[in-house]
């Protein structure tokens, strides 16, 4: 209809308009609230008859005794600046404003400088590499992955087996070790993945004894017929200690670098325990507490760090406190590339259980004590049966002129410790040396946790010279033939002895 009026439909507001209106209303409420608070303060606090005004105003006693002399002194010294200020402004108020603005400006500059000095690194994703390890089958059916470096088994003068540290793999070994140095000393170096790490199958009930047995089976499977050296670095020393305890007859010696022990060991003195724990960060102490009491909670932290699928810094992931030299080393591009590749191999199975088990092993009951490795005479047990055994052994020793029996590890133990190490503090090595006084300790001034072991050719040469003396190269064909001849002669002597025994037996003669 022509005369009918049109009804206007109200426009619907968009989400953006609604948010804008809400922010405006919130701002108005905030301003009104601020004005109300100001009025309350002015009426109840700043009034002339209020307590604050009576005690701290210009006419008060404190102002006359303290405030006015100080203000006059400061204003007198800064009076020559007043001609730079506007004439209609109070100098005291102006200088207070300038001071506050200056402090804010310095704070902003400091924050910007800190951000520019430590830029946020770009996150690099973890890459899954194709399998590359050599494998052996253990007696329980598990596969153990290993890597071999240096000379062959037939030409090796010395064999070294290296269990890796936490969050590492068989690829680590002795980082930066040159093949030419192994050839010069005639060394065969074997590294392997712990159960559940790298390409090794997990162990259903892993402990330090099973770890030592895995090392023994590896040596037998790859043809290490003579005694071998075990190398323990940092937390990898746990497995080296286990080898010294459970397979001492197969070991020629042990080389330890910043050797880790149980920080809850009851044999530690208060000074040794304090010197160890005070070097660690709060987060690391908390992680040790969880590993000892609630190890299952570690899975959450590990999934947030090295199992997140992205790379990060070792000191952040493991809550390490590093010195200047250690920090400079881990930030080096060569070491960073090596570290990232080692981590990628370590976590390739994506299973958190092996890492939780390894962390719990560090702080739980090992099943033995370091005192068990100390070289000492074998003690006689209590009871009549043990007394009779002791008397029989004593009579046999008199008849056969046998030597006295000893317990503990008979071979050499060398300890290298950086004096600026905060990851495994020197107090731990002091504890080990107190319990094992026969161990040779090499203290390294100004060295940290990584600097003496990682990518230091001269350090590696010093280590091998200390262990093996002057380099003589690998075994040549003449020495190998002599060894075979000596072995054949020993076998021939044994067979001759057996034949003599058979000929001297009357039962065999009658036959």
Image (cartoon, rainbow, N blue to C red):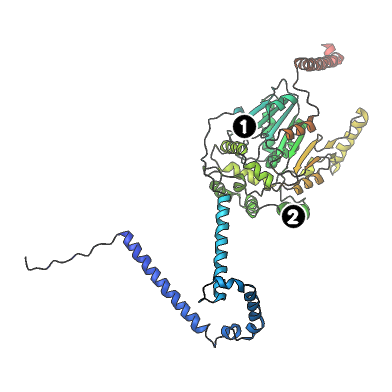
- How many angstroms separate mark 1 from mark 2 (CA)? 42 Å
- Eyeballing the image, is 487 above or below 47? above
Quadrant position of residue 2: bottom left
Please say if 403 is above or below 308: above
Q: Which residue is mark 2?
A: 274
Instruction: Please say if 90 is above or below 249.
Output: below
Between marks 1 and 2 in the image, the one whose residue lies nearer the viewer:
2
Circles 1 and 2: CB atoms closer than 8 Å: no
Could you tell whether 242 is left or right of 139 in the image? right
Q: Position of residue 41 (x, y in %)?
A: 50, 80
**If the image is split into quadrants, where does the N terminus sit?**
bottom left
**Where does the image place residue 104, in percent across and percent down from the top left?**
55, 64
Res 140 label: 1
Query: For this view, does 454 lie left or right of residue 347?
Result: right
**Crowd class of label 1 (few under 14; some 14 to 19; many from 20; radius 10 Å):** few
Q: Give the residue at x 70% y 48%.
A: 422
């Amino acid at each position: 209809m022509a005369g009918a009026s049109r009804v206007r439909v109200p426009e619907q507001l968009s989400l953006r308009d609604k948010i804008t209106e809400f922010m405006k209303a919130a701002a108005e409420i905030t301003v009104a609230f601020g004005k109300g608070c100001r009025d309350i303060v002015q009426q109840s606090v700043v009034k002339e008859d209020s307590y604050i005004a009576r005690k701290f105003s210009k006419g008060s006693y404190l102002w006359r005794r303290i405030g006015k002399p100080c203000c006059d002194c400061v204003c007198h010294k800064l009076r020559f600046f007043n001609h730079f200020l506007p004439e209609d402004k109070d100098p005291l108020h102006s200088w207070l404003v300038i001071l506050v603005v200056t402090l804010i400006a310095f704070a902003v500059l400091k924050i910007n400088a800190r951000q520019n000095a430590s830029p946020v690194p770009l996150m690099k994703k973890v890459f899954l590499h194709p399998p590359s390890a050599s494998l052996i089958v253990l007696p329980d059916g598990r596969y153990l992955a290993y890597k071999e470096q240096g000379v062959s088994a037939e030409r090796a003068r010395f064999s070294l087996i290296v269990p890796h540290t936490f969050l590492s793999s068989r690829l680590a070994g002795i980082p930066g070790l040159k093949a030419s140095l192994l050839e010069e000393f005639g060394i065969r170096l074997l590294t392997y993945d712990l159960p559940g790490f790298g390409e090794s199958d997990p162990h259903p009930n892993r402990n330090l004894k099973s770890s030592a047995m895995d090392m023994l089976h590896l040596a037998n499977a790859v043809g290490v017929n003579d005694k071998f050296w075990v190398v323990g670095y940092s937390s990898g020393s746990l497995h080296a200690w286990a080898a010294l305890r459970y397979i001492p007859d197969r070991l020629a010696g042990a080389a330890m670098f910043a050797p880790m022990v149980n920080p809850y060991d009851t044999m530690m003195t208060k000074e040794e325990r304090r010197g160890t724990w005070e070097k660690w960060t709060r987060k690391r102490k908390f992680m040790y507490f969880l590993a000892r009491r609630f190890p299952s909670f570690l899975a959450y932290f590990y999934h947030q760090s090295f199992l997140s699928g992205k790379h990060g810094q070792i000191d952040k992931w493991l809550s390490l406190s590093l010195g200047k030299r250690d920090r400079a080393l881990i930030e080096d591009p060569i070491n960073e590339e090596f570290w990232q590749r080692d981590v990628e191999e370590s976590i390739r199975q994506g299973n958190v259980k092996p890492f939780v088990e390894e962390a719990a092993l560090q702080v739980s009951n090992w099943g033995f004590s370091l005192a068990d490795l100390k070289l000492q005479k074998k003690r006689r047990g209590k009871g009549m049966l043990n007394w009779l055994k002791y008397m029989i052994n004593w009579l046999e020793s008199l008849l056969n002129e046998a030597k006295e029996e000893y317990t503990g590890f008979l071979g050499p133990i060398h300890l290298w410790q950086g004096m600026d190490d905060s990851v495994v503090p020197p107090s731990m090595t002091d504890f080990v040396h107190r319990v094992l006084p026969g161990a040779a300790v090499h203290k390294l001034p100004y060295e940290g946790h990584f600097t003496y072991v990682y990518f230091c050719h001269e350090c590696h040469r010093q280590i091998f010279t200390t262990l093996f003396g002057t380099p003589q190269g690998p075994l040549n064909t003449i020495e190998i033939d002599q060894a075979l001849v000596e072995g054949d002669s020993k076998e021939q002597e044994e067979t001759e002895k057996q034949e003599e025994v058979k000929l001297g037996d009357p039962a065999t003669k009658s036959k």
